[in-house]
């Protein structure tokens, strides 16, 4: 049965409420795009180049003023390496939900049955695997010193040092820059996960330096947290920027006049994930020797069973 709406005020009130709801949705959509872009370390310009959507339009979208077509939205999510539902769902996709989605896609039928039993409230049949000993991973933004400090610490400890990006390049057969050009964010992240899986199969002791954006992928980050003790190597934003400039590498902020603003946005987006590390090494204002000494002490604490949280 259809009930007619009363004329006048009720109809206009409904239209007004719908308009407010639409505006709220567009604001939320813009915020999700901005947060996802920052988490993946992409400037607005780099996202525009990767998606084919103009930088001006992306700015309007992030400000809640752009009404996207489904085609443009698909281009943006592909460039971000994310499913479209992460942007348009009723709620923002939580990292745990994204992680579960990734695990389910890879799970065997037997594992899925176990998960279903647990969700029904039954007792888990298996305990989670224990973290491997003598495996430490360094996370943090570019410019923190992960690679340089990692090499020094590994040499002093007699451990094997691995830089994950080099393993990705070895797996793909060409450079990280070429990987992004050919396959984009999504392709790089798939290779990153595979490379990490291979590294975790290597015998300890092992010290791993990861790329700054690894934390953007819940499945990959979960594998890292389960297989390694983790240390967040951090520094003040101005030190990050100075070190990156010294390296001659402004990815993904090349040709940006507001590079520091972009770096601050990336750090803000990733900081909650970096903060999940077992320990923190702040290199701000420290010499290379002081930072290396601090890193070695943290690793030795892990080995003694007194490090971490």
Image (spheres, rainbow, N blue to C red):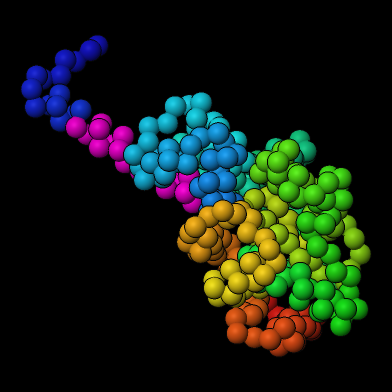
Residue displayed at 53% across by 46% down: 45
Report which quarter residue 149 is drawn in.
bottom right
| Percent coordinates x, y for residue 7 in the rendering | 9, 19
Residue displayed at 42% across by 48% down: 31
Please state if 73 lies on the left or on the right of 166 as rendered. Answer: left
Which residue occupies the extreme top position in the image? 1
- Name above or below for residue 29 compared with residue 170: above
Would residue 211 be seen by someone viewing this image from the given angle?
Answer: yes
Please state if 90 lies on the left or on the right of 44 as rendered. Answer: left
* Residue 114 is inside the magenta segment: no
| Percent coordinates x, y for residue 123 in the rendering | 67, 52
- Pick whichever, 32 or 285, lies toward us: 285
| Percent coordinates x, y for residue 184 in the rendering | 67, 41
Residue displayed at 77% across by 79% down: 299
- Pick whichever, 1 or 197, lies toward us: 197
Would residue 112 be seen by someone viewing this image from the given angle?
Answer: no
Q: Main secondary structure of the magenta part?
A: helix
| Percent coordinates x, y for residue 36 in the rendering | 53, 48
- Quarter of the figure that contains the C terminus: bottom right
- Pick whichever, 167 or 102, lies toward us: 167
Residue displayed at 87% across by 45% down: 173
- Name above or below for residue 57 compared with residue 282: above
Q: What residue range appears in magenta?
A: 16-36
């Amino acid at each position: 049965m259809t009930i007619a709406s009363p004329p006048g005020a009720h109809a206009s009130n409904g239209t007004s409420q719908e308009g407010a709801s639409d505006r709220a949705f567009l604001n939320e959509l813009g915020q999700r795009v901005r947060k996802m872009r920052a988490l993946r370390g992409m400037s607005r310009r780099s996202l525009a180049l990767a998606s084919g959507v103009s930088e001006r339009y992306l700015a309007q979208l992030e400000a809640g003023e752009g009404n996207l077509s489904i085609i443009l939205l698909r281009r943006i999510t592909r460039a971000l390496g994310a499913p479209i539902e992460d942007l348009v769902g009723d709620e923002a996709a939580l990292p745990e939900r994204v992680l579960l989605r990734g695990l389910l896609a890879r799970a065997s039928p037997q594992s899925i049955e176990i998960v279903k039993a647990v969700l029904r409230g039954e007792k888990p049949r298996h305990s989670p695997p224990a973290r491997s000993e003598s495996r430490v991973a360094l996370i943090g933004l570019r410019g923190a010193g992960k690679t340089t400090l990692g090499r020094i610490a590994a040499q002093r400890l007699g451990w094997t040092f691995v830089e994950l990006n080099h393993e990705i390049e070895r797996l793909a057969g060409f450079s990280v820059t070429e990987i992004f050009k050919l396959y984009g964010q999504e392709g790089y992240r798939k290779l990153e996960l595979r490379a990490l899986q291979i590294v975790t199969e290597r015998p300890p002791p092992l010290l791993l330096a990861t790329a700054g954006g690894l934390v953007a992928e819940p499945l990959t980050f979960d594998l890292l947290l389960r297989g390694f003790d983790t240390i967040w190597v951090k520094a003040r934003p101005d030190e990050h920027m100075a070190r990156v400039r010294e390296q001659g590498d402004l990815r993904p902020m090349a040709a940006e006049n507001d590079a520091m603003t972009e770096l601050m946005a990336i750090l803000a987006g990733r900081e909650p994930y970096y903060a999940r590390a077992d320990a923190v090494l702040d290199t701000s204002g420290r010499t290379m020797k002081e930072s290396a000494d601090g890193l070695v002490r943290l690793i030795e604490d892990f080995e003694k069973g007194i490090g971490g949280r």
